[in-house]
Amino acid sequence: MESDPQKRKELYFEAEKMLCVDEAVTIPLYYYTTVDCNNPYVERTYQLVGEQHWEKWKIKAH
């Protein structure tokens, strides 16, 4: 345990460097994907979050 604040700061910096730079690994475990097929005559509603509401879609006249 280090009581000198400056030495502790240096040790924290070194630990952060080891964790985030030297040994950093990113493994995507799951990636959300969707496939949408659109026709120019379908007027869609877009949701910010969650599922699409197909019952609110409209078919435009050609």
Image (cartoon, rainbow, N blue to C red):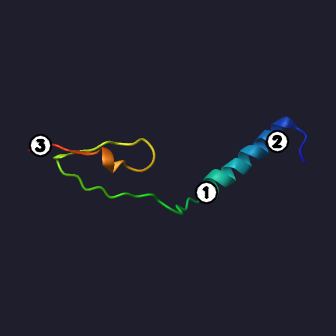
Q: Kindly check if marks 1 and 3 are in contact, taking CB atoms under 8 A apart as contact.
A: no
Determine the secondary structure under disc 1: loop
Q: Residue furthest top?
A: 5
Counting residues from the N terminus, which is met first, the one under dot 1 or under dot 2? 2
- Name which residue type carries label 1: Ala
The x, y position of residue 10, in whole percent, is 77, 42
Indicate the quadrant where residue 22 lies.
bottom right
The x, y position of residue 9, in whole percent, is 78, 39
Closest to the observer: 43 or 26?
Answer: 43
Report crowding for label 3: few under 14, some 14 to 19, many 20 or more residues within 10 A (C-alpha): few
Residue at horizontal 16 percent and vertical 47 percent from the top? 40
Residue at horizontal 27 percent and vertical 45 percent from the top? 57
Q: Is residue 16 left or right of residue 25?
A: right
Which residue does the numbered mark 3 point to in the structure image?
A: 61
Label disc, if present, on residue 8 of the rendered structure: 2
Q: Is residue 40 left or right of residue 44?
A: left
Counting residues from the N terminus, which is met first, the one under dot 3 or under dot 2? 2
Nearer the camera: disc 1 or disc 2: 1
The x, y position of residue 36, in whole percent, is 29, 55
Residue at horizontal 67 percent and vertical 49 percent from the top? 17
- For the C terminus, the quadrant is top left
Report crowding for label 1: few under 14, some 14 to 19, many 20 or more residues within 10 A (C-alpha): few
Label disc, if present, on residue 24 of the rendered structure: 1
Question: Alpha carbon of mark 1 to alpha carbon of mark 3: how far?
Answer: 55 Å
The x, y position of residue 11, in whole percent, is 78, 46
Question: Alpha carbon of mark 3 to alpha carbon of mark 2: how far?
Answer: 70 Å
Q: Is residue 2 left or right of residue 17?
A: right
Q: Residue furthest front?
A: 55
- Name which residue type carries label 3: Ala
Determine the secondary structure under disc 2: helix
Residue at horizontal 50 percent and vertical 62 percent from the top? 30
Determine the secondary structure under disc 3: loop
